[in-house]
Amino acid sequence: MAPHLDSAYGLARYLCRDAASAEDIAQDALLKAFAGFDGFRGGSPRAWLLAIVRNAYIDWGRRSRARRESGAPHLGMYDAADVADADTPTPEAALIARGDAMALRGAIEALDEPFRETLVLRDIEGLNYQQIAEITGAPVGTVMSRLSRARRALTDRLSPAEGIRE
């Protein structure tokens, strides 16, 4: 599972929109994967792990709702420093890249959950439609439709007037 740790954390972060909670979700998913490794029946270990991350996120959401209803505090969003590009050669380029990354992350986060989840699994994690269908429990046609709608929504939100440069 070690090669897929970044993917597990990345999916959790996009789903829950909070770095600290994403760490908890990914850790919980890895513990569940380790405990249930005997149940792995072949196929893609990455897709299997990401399905566990998704389920851990759903469990986290239930617990989070219960905490909100009881008045527990809610954690914040991403830090701007989380999206900085260390390889950018100039401060001006770094500022532009950071703004673009923040705009993209914000646009992804603004998507409804089924669309955000599908987009992250396909375009960020690189899973195929069948793997996404298995993870989400949706038919392949629904996965394709959600992906198309998510991409269209991102294009609409990230027009040049919105701040992303072409």
Image: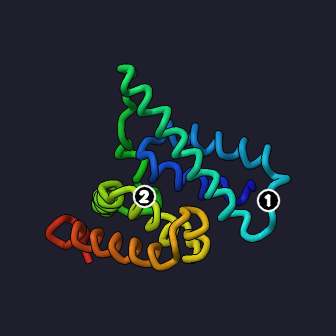
| Closest to the observer, 58 or 162 | 58
Identified by mark 1, the residue type is Phe
Give above or below for 156 relative to 26. below
Q: Is residue 28 left or right of residue 71?
A: right
Residue found 49% across the figure and 32% down from its top:
63
Image quarter of the C terminus = bottom left
Residue found 45% across the figure and 45% down from its top:
16
Tell me if label 2 and label 1 are in contact, CB under 8 Å.
Answer: no
x, y percent for residue 124: 50, 67
Give the number of the mark in front: 2 or 1: 1
Q: Residues within 10 Å of mark 1 (few under 14, many from 20)?
A: few
x, y percent for residue 107: 30, 60
x, y percent for residue 74: 37, 29
Give above or below for 118 relative to 112. below
x, y percent for residue 162: 18, 65
Residue found 39% across the figure and 71% down from its top:
146
Which residue carries the number 1 mark? 40
Residue found 38% across the figure and 43% down from its top:
78
Which residue carries the number 2 mark? 85
Identified by mark 2, the residue type is Asp
- Residue 23: name its quadrant: top right
The answer, for residue 34, to whether it is visible in the render is yes
Mark closer to the chain start, 2 or 1: 1
Image quarter of the N terminus = bottom right
| Closest to the observer, 78 or 139 | 139
Give above or below for 94 relative to 71. below
Q: Residue furthest left?
A: 161
Q: Is residue 21 left or right of residue 75?
A: right
Give above or below for 163 relative to 76. below
Q: Residues within 10 Å of mark 2 (few under 14, many from 20)?
A: some
- Residue 160: name its quadrant: bottom left
